[in-house]
Image (tube, coloured by chain):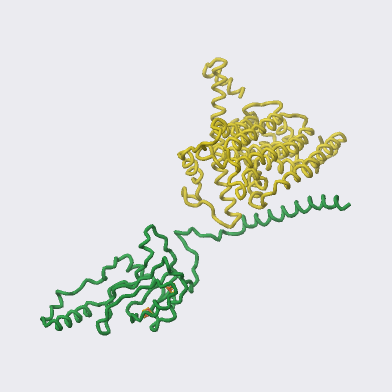
Chain colours: A yellow, B green
Amino acid sequence: METLIGVFEQQLGLEGVWALSAAYSVCIGSLLGFITVYAMFAIWMERKVAAHMQVRMGPMETGAWHGWAQSIADAVKLLFKEDIIPSQSNKVMFWIAPAVVFCGVFAGFIVIPFALGLQIADLNLGIFFLISIASIEVIGVIMAGWASNSKYSLFGAIREAAQVVSYEIPTATALLVPILVVGSFRLDDFNLWQEANGWLIFHSPWMMLAGLVFFISSLAGCKRAPFDLPEAESELVSGFHTEYSGMRFSFFFLEEYASMFVASAVMATLWFGGWTIPFVDMSTWTDPDSFGLSDVAVTSIGIVVLLAKTFFFIFVQMWLRWTLPRLRVDQVMTLGYKYLVPWGFVALVMTAIFKYYGWGWFPN
Amino acid sequence: MGAVRDYFGNIASALTTTAKGMSVTLHHFRNEPPITVQYPFERMNIPDRYRGLHILEQDKCIDCHLCAKACPVDCIEIEAIHHGRTLEWKKFTIDYKKCIFCEFCIPPCPVDCIHMTTEYELATDNVDDMTEDLLSWTGLRPEDQFAIEASEAKKAGKAAPTKAATAAPEGGGDDDDKAAKIAAIKARMAKKS
Ligand code: SF4
Ligand code: SF4
């Protein structure tokens, strides 16, 4: 971000505010483009993964190769669909709810380090920002459910509220565990630490436990199966977005896949080394006597490494979705409060003890 | 201690059953090819004894109406004019809106000329298309036509018309499409038996 502002100031001769807004537009534009393309790919991937797990084929016709253009066709269809607003709904809230939902997740993207220095905002409270901004999404969901004036939507929204509020505790607790070891809230610090020391997941068994707790509770945060109670097709038609259609509906879809990406990217960054390869100092690759790669090439390698890890976790999320049946509401609460919260705290306390005595599988 | 054992038992069973389930889905994902087919382009194998649309070996049929009588839903309609032993077919239709594919019409046939094929595609946007015409031609060859017309002319006391003037066009008014389809079905039936 700062680099970009500098570029705009020096190369194009823009002044203060103008350089700032130009840089912001470029960042937001590229991020929006990335999210859209990624979401289309992820939806296609989900359909293919689902199909093959059920011994089917999935989309095969649109686009010549394995239906790759299916999502594009769907997006175009959704764009041209009529935007129906129920007459008994609260129009204003109904209107802005998809935007609020999407903004919450979109804001999460700005702290994710895609590669060395490739981060829109390098906040030193990055993780803190991430967990607090992710809660905005639930406000949008409640708005959508309430404004729709439909019992299914309202039930979906209430479930979402209960679920997200409960699962934020284990999420935050589990996130504290790597923070404890690395001693920073800045996301890039985790990458650098893990580049030097190895993946945090192998730090101690308690770190693995924390990773598991975070993964499960992030599933609940993303409303992914088996925690897709807010949408619960078999019970609530389509949950909180029952009344939505066309473009507004597609925003909820975009949000779901974007939040999957954020959760997986955080998982990859905090526990699996983000864009780094352990014990490989990528910054030396630009030296002529090692590989002599250009900065752009090293950055792209970083992006590819992060995306590979992220997509692995996205795949696991899809895999779980097509494996497990949906939990009941009381089971969700039981799992959250009786299992994840205590084990999250156990992981936190034990890691603190490990850190104090310097135990663990590699030096810290 | 029951509660504690339950608690840890729950954790253990949740982890193991999830792992088990995931291994099953992963096995499907990696090792099992899709069992579905790309329907309009390829089809599943239909068992030979599948009860699909009917075909009629028209030259063998003797217009005895046994099949129509056996039909529990009365969906077969037959109409033919007997010129001595030669049949001039007017109608042999099966109304697939009513047909229940019970195969009751097949065994009564004394000359074994009505069969069921493995065709099953009945979808149409026109309800009249649900009534299939099993006739592919009127049942009269040109020489039959000539003989009939000659005998009728004799009855009326007129001179027999020349053969050339009355050579009826073949095809009996059916479109080529349908004739080709029936020919294909017949060829397949012949291959099967
Ligand atoms: S299959 Fe059964 S219902 Fe159909 S025409 Fe034959 S006897 Fe009638
Ligand atoms: S029972 Fe056989 S011979 Fe008799 S009318 Fe039916 S198809 Fe023709």
Kindly tell me whether residue A1 is visible in this rendering: yes
Residue A272 position, x and y percent, is 71, 40
Identify the image quadrant of the N terminus of chain A.
Answer: top right
Residue A205 position, x and y percent, is 80, 43
At 23% from the left and 80% from the top, the residue drawn is: B144
Tell me: residue A131, above or below residue B71: above
Residue that sits furthest to the right in the current view: B1
Left or right of A116: which side holds A199?
A: right
Residue B70 in which image quadrant: bottom left
Residue B28 in which image quadrant: bottom right
Tell me: residue A340, above or below residue A9: below
Ligand 1's quadrant: bottom left
Left or right of A183: which side holds A160?
A: left
Left or right of A316: which side holds A357?
A: right
Of residues B158 and B26, which is closer to you in this image? B158
Left or right of B97: which side holds A27?
A: right
Kindly tell me whether residue A294 is visible in this rendering: no
Number of numbered discs on residues: 0
Residue A27 position, x and y percent, is 57, 27
Residue B56 in which image quadrant: bottom left
Identify the image quadrant of the C terminus of chain A.
Answer: top right
Residue that sits furthest to the front in the current view: A88
Tell me: residue A72, above or below residue B53: above
Of residues A282 and B186, which is closer to you in this image? B186
Residue A52 position, x and y percent, is 58, 54
